[in-house]
Image (spheres, rainbow, N blue to C red):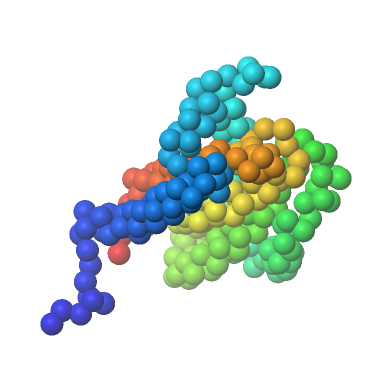
């Protein structure tokens, strides 16, 4: 008898299995929504798909009466600009910290405790401080992502550098390579695919920090719109916005994963 622990579904089967929980959740929602609407047609908690389709059509394809903007796309552009800016800065800082702290022991002894301390600080706890220091504009929102994500990336990359076989560094030194050459030609090429993986794994946290910042102080953005609609119990807008955020996060992660496998196929060989 074949044991389940030794079963490895093919790509098509794996995709179909992954769809089953989503279809089950969709079915549960449809049943619950129909049951509530049958009792109260004006119920707002679980709107039907017709109501959500109308709301999304209004948000995405009809200009706002007050501003003349297409709110869904305006919010999406604002949120993605903040998210990608924060992720880019975090990736750059995390790469530098991970490379130097992991590759140069004196630098690691100097900066590693600071990075560890920063990783232990809840980013949302210092959000009021960021608003005081950087104002309520874009900088404070981007800085929240940077402060929340950079320590994770830096510590992950530092650990990856320390796991590189010592024999590679010794061999480079026997070829008369100095420290900068070892960092640039031996360690950095092996660090870049791990950087992409670290960024991919930190996207969930970055979205969390972004939504929290937009909910507190913003005039546009996906998080701002969700918390604004909360005041009116507009679940027909909130639920599609949540689904849209999920789709954006999935697409960003898929793009990073596909790019990484094509750029560094050797890293993903098992």
Q: What residue do we see at 77% from left, 51% from top? A: 127
Kindly identify the residue that appears in the image at 45 percent across and 48 percent down: 38
Q: Looking at the picture, does residue 106 appear above or below residue 242?
A: below
Q: Nearer the viewer, residue 221 or 253?
A: 221
Between 73 and 103, the one lying in front of the other is 73
Residue 161 screen position, x and y as percent: 53, 64
160 to the left or right of 118: left
**188 and 260: which is toward the camera:** 260
Which residue in the rendered view is the most extreme toward the right? 132
- Residue 102 coordinates in the image, percent (x, y): 59, 64
Looking at the figure, which quarter contains the N terminus?
bottom left
Task: Give coordinates of residue 266: x percent, y percent.
Answer: 33, 55
Quick one: which residue is furthest to the bottom in this view? 1
Query: Looking at the image, which is closer to me, 182 or 30?
Result: 30
The residue at 57%/23% (across/down) is 70
| Extreme-front residue of the structure | 39
Relative to 191, is 26 on the left or the right?
left
Image quarter of residue 148:
bottom right
Residue 76 visible? The answer is yes
Residue 139, x across and y down, in percent? 74, 38
Q: Kindly tell me whether residue 185 is visible in this rendering.
A: no
- How many numbered marks have been drawn onto this rendered protein structure? 0
Quarter of the picture containing the C terminus is: bottom left
């Amino acid at each position: 008898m074949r044991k389940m622990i030794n079963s490895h579904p093919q790509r098509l089967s794996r995709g179909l299995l992954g769809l089953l929980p989503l279809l089950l959740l969709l079915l549960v929602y449809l049943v619950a929504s129909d049951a509530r609407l049958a009792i109260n047609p004006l119920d707002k908690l679980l709107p039907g798909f017709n109501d959500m389709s109308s709301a999304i059509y209004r948000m995405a394809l009809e200009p706002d009466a007050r501003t003349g903007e297409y709110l869904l796309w305006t919010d999406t552009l604002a949120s993605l600009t903040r998210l990608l800016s924060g992720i880019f800065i975090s990736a750059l800082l995390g790469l530098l910290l991970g490379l130097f702290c992991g590759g140069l022991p004196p630098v690691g002894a100097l900066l590693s405790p600071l990075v560890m301390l920063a990783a232990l600080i809840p980013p949302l706890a210092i959000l009021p401080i960021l608003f005081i220091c950087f104002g309520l504009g874009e900088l404070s929102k981007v800085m929240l992502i940077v402060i929340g994500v950079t320590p994770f990336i830096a510590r992950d990359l530092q650990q990856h550098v320390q796991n590189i076989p010592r024999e590679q560094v010794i061999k480079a030194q026997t070829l008369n390579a100095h420290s900068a050459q070892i960092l640039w030609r031996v360690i950095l090429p092996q660090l870049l695919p791990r950087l992409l993986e670290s960024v991919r794994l930190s996207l969930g946290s970055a979205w969390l920090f972004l939504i929290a910042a937009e909910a507190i102080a913003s005039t546009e953005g996906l998080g701002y719109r969700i918390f604004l609609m909360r005041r009116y119990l507009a679940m027909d807008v909130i639920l599609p916005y949540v689904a849209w955020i999920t789709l954006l996060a999935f697409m960003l992660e898929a793009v990073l994963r596909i790019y990484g496998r094509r750029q560094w196929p050797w890293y993903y060989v098992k």
